[in-house]
Image (cartoon, helix red, strand yellow):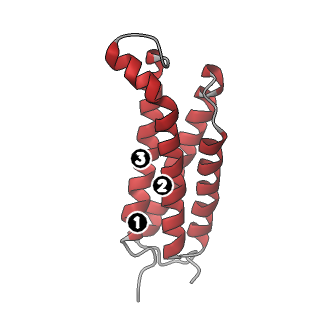
Amino acid sequence: MIAIQKNKAVGFYLIVLAGVLAIASLVRYVIWAPAHNAMNSIILLALIAGLAVNILLIIFDNDFLVILVTTLYSIALFQLFVDSIGSFVDAYQGIVMFGDPTQVGNIASISVLIVTSILTSIIAGFMNRVKRV
């Protein structure tokens, strides 16, 4: 069923919000990562693919697309965690050995955007995205 109609439910707007948050996280990551030699193609591709699926989900209402978009955003988040664990360890230990502890705030802000996008898409998956008449 095509979702671009007059009768949009709350779930549809949550999907749009998830996409906007993903765009914000992608922009934030693309600005931050190259300046700190932290660019990872898996994170970049997962966010871009997630946005593409999110756009498809806005056009076509499909539960499997909700699962796919959530999975892609989750891949980006967990890869960011894997890449950044050294910085968190260094911040906790108060040393500079495995990462850059000064970047924990930036990593956390990008992670919060991605987590919010994931949670928003999960919640939207349980809600109607098109009003039933």
Percent coordinates x, y for residue 47 in the rendering: 59, 48
Amino acid on which the number 1 mark rests in the picture: Ala
Name the foreground residue: 75 vs 120. 75
Residue at disc 3, secondary structure: helix
Name the foreground residue: 15 vs 73. 73
Residue lying at the far front in this picture: please name it.
Answer: 97
Distance from disc 1 to disc 2, alpha carbons, whole Å, reads: 9 Å
Residues at discs 1 and 3 in contact (Cβ within 8 Å): no
In this rendering, position of residue 124 left or right of residue 26: left
- The label shown at residue 115 is 3
- The label shown at residue 124 is 1
Residue at disc 1, secondary structure: helix
Percent coordinates x, y for residue 110 in the rendering: 48, 35
Amino acid on which the number 2 mark rests in the picture: Ala
Note whether 100 is above or below 117 in the view shown: above
In this rendering, position of residue 37 left or right of residue 95: right
Amino acid on which the number 3 mark rests in the picture: Val
Q: Residue at x 45, y 42 (%)?
A: 113
The residue beneath circle 2 is 18
Note whether 119 is above or below 10 in the view shown: above
Q: Residues within 10 Å of mark 1 (few under 14, many from 20)?
A: many
User: Which quadrant of the figure contains the C terminus?
Assistant: bottom left
Percent coordinates x, y for residue 24 in the rendering: 54, 41
In this rendering, position of residue 27 left or right of residue 95: right
Q: Nearer the viewer, mark 1 or mark 3?
A: 3
Residues at discs 2 and 3 in contact (Cβ within 8 Å): no
**Of the residues under marks 1 and 3, which one precedes in the sequence?**
3
- The label shown at residue 14 is none
